[in-house]
Image (tube, rainbow, N blue to C red):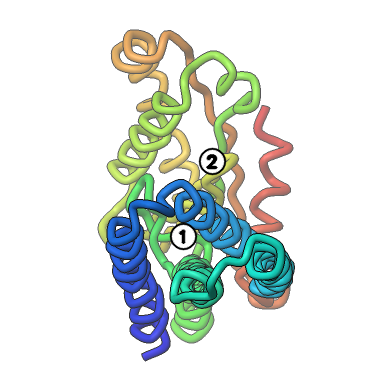
């Protein structure tokens, strides 16, 4: 509902801006003798409206007060000194200039509301998202939910559960050698490679997309995880000679850390990740 109101305010003000501009054009055409003066006043009205759009309505109203005071002084001078007659043209810009200002403020108000709502929706989407945009893998939020369930199942049914944490060696140095687009493709290729190295009942996650870190939850013990580690490294080695070397002109190597779940040592999913990451230090 708020979003509709913001759009209505912004769109209504935008359309009203055309209406009052048309009125000003008709007024100016109807009085050719004062064409130059009307052009000047129209430019002043636009200038105040533009300043209001990029600042605040208070600034615009203060500028209108200055304009009204100056225009009133100018009109008084014409009446007293030059003997001019006060007519409709004397009141027209006193009314239209504040209307331009208020219209510009309404457009600003509507646009800022839409921008704020858009930012809030982006933040909400980020906080609720469970998939990584680049690789279509489950992210760290999804990992925490799944790991909680898997840890409970492991404890209840005595099923071994092991977490692998996979990182690319020398990532900071490698990303300086290829373009950002190639880095995204490389992350995607490595993700697909990891998917082919696990069983259907295991799960793969993108734990960190900025410094690519994958997590693999395996229903196996530590020895079984070693089989997956060897298989993954063999596939990367094969890809280095076939795919990566030709496509990216660089050689990729992985750091892999593994930790088997133990209820007394791994109370939460975050502890699971932390302890698995510590094992990366031993994979040199």
Task: Say which mark, if any, is on residue 260.
Answer: none
Residue 247, percent from left and from top: 33, 14
Q: Residue furthest bottom?
A: 1
The answer for how far apart the CA atoms under marks 2 and 1 are is 11 Å
Q: In the picture provided, is 161 more to the left or to the right than 191?
A: right
Quadrant where the C terminus is found in the figure? top right
* Relative horizontal placement of residue 68, taking residue 141 as reference (left or right): right
User: Vertical placement of 213 versus 146: above or below?
Assistant: above
**Element type at marker 2?**
loop
Residue identifier under label 1: 139
Residue 159 visible, this orientation? no
- Residue 84 lies in quadrant: bottom right
Mark 2 and mark 1 lie on one chain; the one further toward the N terminus is 1
The residue positioned 33% from the left and 64% from the top of the image is 27
Residue 45, how many percent across, how many down? 53, 60
Q: Tell me which residue sits at (51%, 83%) in the image.
A: 152
Q: Indicate left or right for 195 with 217 as reference.
A: left
Which residue bears the numbered disc 2?
212
Q: Position of residue 196 (x, y in %)?
A: 28, 42
Which is more toward the observer, 202 or 48? 48
């Amino acid at each position: 509902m708020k979003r509709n109101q913001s759009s209505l305010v912004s769109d209504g003000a935008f359309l009203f801006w055309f209406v009052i501009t048309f009125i000003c054009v008709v007024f100016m055409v109807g009085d050719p003798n004062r064409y130059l003066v009307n052009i000047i006043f129209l430019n002043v009205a636009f200038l105040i409206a533009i300043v209001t759009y990029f600042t605040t309505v208070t600034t615009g109203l203060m500028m209108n007060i200055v304009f009204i005071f100056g225009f009133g002084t100018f009109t008084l001078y014409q009446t007293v000194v030059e003997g001019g007659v006060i007519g409709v043209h004397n009141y027209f810009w006193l009314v239209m200039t504040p209307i331009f200002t208020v219209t510009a403020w309404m457009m600003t108000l509507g646009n800022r509301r839409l921008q704020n709502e858009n930012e809030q929706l982006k933040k909400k989407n980020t906080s609720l998202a469970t998939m990584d945009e680049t690789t279509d893998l489950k992210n760290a939020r999804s990992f925490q939910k799944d790991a909680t369930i898997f840890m409970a199942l492991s404890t209840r049914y005595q099923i071994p559960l092991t977490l692998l944490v996979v990182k690319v060696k020398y990532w900071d140095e490698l990303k300086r050698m290829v373009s950002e687009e190639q880095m995204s493709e490389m992350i995607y290729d490595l993700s697909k490679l990891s998917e082919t190295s696990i069983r259907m009942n295991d799960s793969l996650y993108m734990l960190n997309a900025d410094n690519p870190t994958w997590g693999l939850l395996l229903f196996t013990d530590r020895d079984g995880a070693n089989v997956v580690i060897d298989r993954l490294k063999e596939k990367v080695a094969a890809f280095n000679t076939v795919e990566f070397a030709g496509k990216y002109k660089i050689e990729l190597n992985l750091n892999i850390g593994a930790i088997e779940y133990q209820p007394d040592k791994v109370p939460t999913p975050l502890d699971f990740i932390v302890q698995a990451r510590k094992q990366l230090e031993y994979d040199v």
